[in-house]
Amino acid sequence: MEKGVDIFLEKLSEDDAFLLLNGVKGLGPITIRRLLERFQNDPIAVLRASKSELMQVRGVGEGSADSIRNEENPDWLEKEKGRIKKRGIDFITQTQLPPLLQEIYDCPIGLYVLGALPPGPYVSIVGTRMPSNYGKRVCQELAFVLAQRGFCIVSGMARGIDAVAHQGALEAKGKTVAFLGSGLDVIYPPEHTDLYRKISETGAVLSEFPLGRKADRRTFPMRNRLVSGISSGVIVVESASSGGSLITAKLAADQGRMVLAVPGRVDQVSASGCNQLIRDGATLVRNADDVMEEIEPSLSAIERQVNPLGEQLEHSPEHGSDASISEEESKLIKAFEEGDYLSMEELGEITSLEASKLSSNLTMLELNGLICKRSDGRFEAL
């Protein structure tokens, strides 16, 4: 190793060494853990090691060893520190992570944090990117009530259920954190820029990836293990029979976390994953009380002391009341009792209302928040 690099390593702090090691290309969290175990948990010793010493560690090939000893590492580190400072980001190392996250087999050696990581207990809510109105409503109510009762709501800031979970916690003036599958300066999806800002102002947005890293098929599963790993339990709200939500649920089970799922209709594709999870042993969740009943007994004394769970402070925003609806509107409401999505023609056949009355009554029910019109033109009860 060149003399200039040796001088650089002599002046290197432990935190900076962790930041640099985290940014080395070709190294994953498990290989980094093996390297630290080999070198007495000293990241500077890892960076000082010879190529032959590094290659004695399982998972470290010639390319990885060369990346660890790359002469351009000092320049990368200084630039990364400058970018971190400019954006108001912190890099916290493994010992500063929440206790549950430190327990997982492939714990990151550090996380980039924008905002302030709230204390636990944490509960994750994940699900489909294309939820039904039922799924959105259930997710919002779960996140709202659990946030009020002291839980920090965790998700991945993706489209659909993830975003609704974060928004529910924010509406309750509670805490929420988002793990990204990209660097913190790459907001994905881009339309969630405002949500990203709100989460970072009241909680934290986190990532293990260096700045500039774009999301890809590899980064999302890595992100998912952190969503489950930090949490006492993972709640799945609407999921098809395959997808990221079920990956997160599997990771949660492997990590010894509770897996909970909201049931759905047996003929609804977006509920098939949740129904299968329940059949395989996941806890069926109807409301926040079910979650509290399952998770609260398992919380550690530290979690209870840091953030004692309290009773719900106020009710979640309610949908329209049926106290003043007309007889014709009552007929329409009754038509949705089986949970079907119904077209205008089907509603006309069921209620025998003429087209003009049907249209006006549907409009009133929409305005009162009792039904909504779906993108396919059918109507759904809320």
Image (cartoon, rainbow, N blue to C red):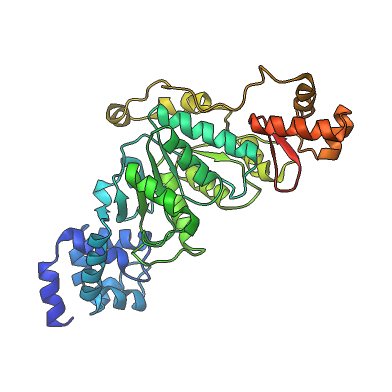
Quarter of the picture holding the N terminus: bottom left
Q: Residue 379 vs residue 122: left or right?
A: right
Dividing the picture into quadrants, the one containing residue 108 is: bottom left
Which residue lies at the image location 64% right of the left edge and 44% below the top edge?
273
Which residue lies at the image location 49% right of the left edge and 56% below the top edge?
191
Furthest-bottom residue in this view: 2
Which residue lies at the image location 26% right of the left edge and 58% below the top edge?
37
- Look at the image and tell me whether residue 326 can be seen: yes
Q: Residue 262 vs residue 314: left or right?
A: right
Dividing the picture into quadrants, the one containing residue 280 is: top right
Dividing the picture into quadrants, the one containing residue 109 is: bottom left
Furthest-top residue in this view: 323
Q: Position of residue 332 (x, y in %)?
A: 78, 27
Total labels: the figure holds 0
Which residue lies at the image location 28% right of the left edge and 59% below the top edge?
87
Q: Position of residue 304 (x, y in %)?
A: 32, 27
Q: Position of residue 197 (x, y in %)?
A: 38, 50
Quarter of the picture holding the C terminus: top right
- Look at the image and tell me whether residue 266 can be seen: no
Q: Nearer the viewer, residue 233 or 76?
A: 76
Q: Nearer the viewer, residue 139 or 345?
A: 345
Q: Position of residue 317 (x, y in %)?
A: 52, 28
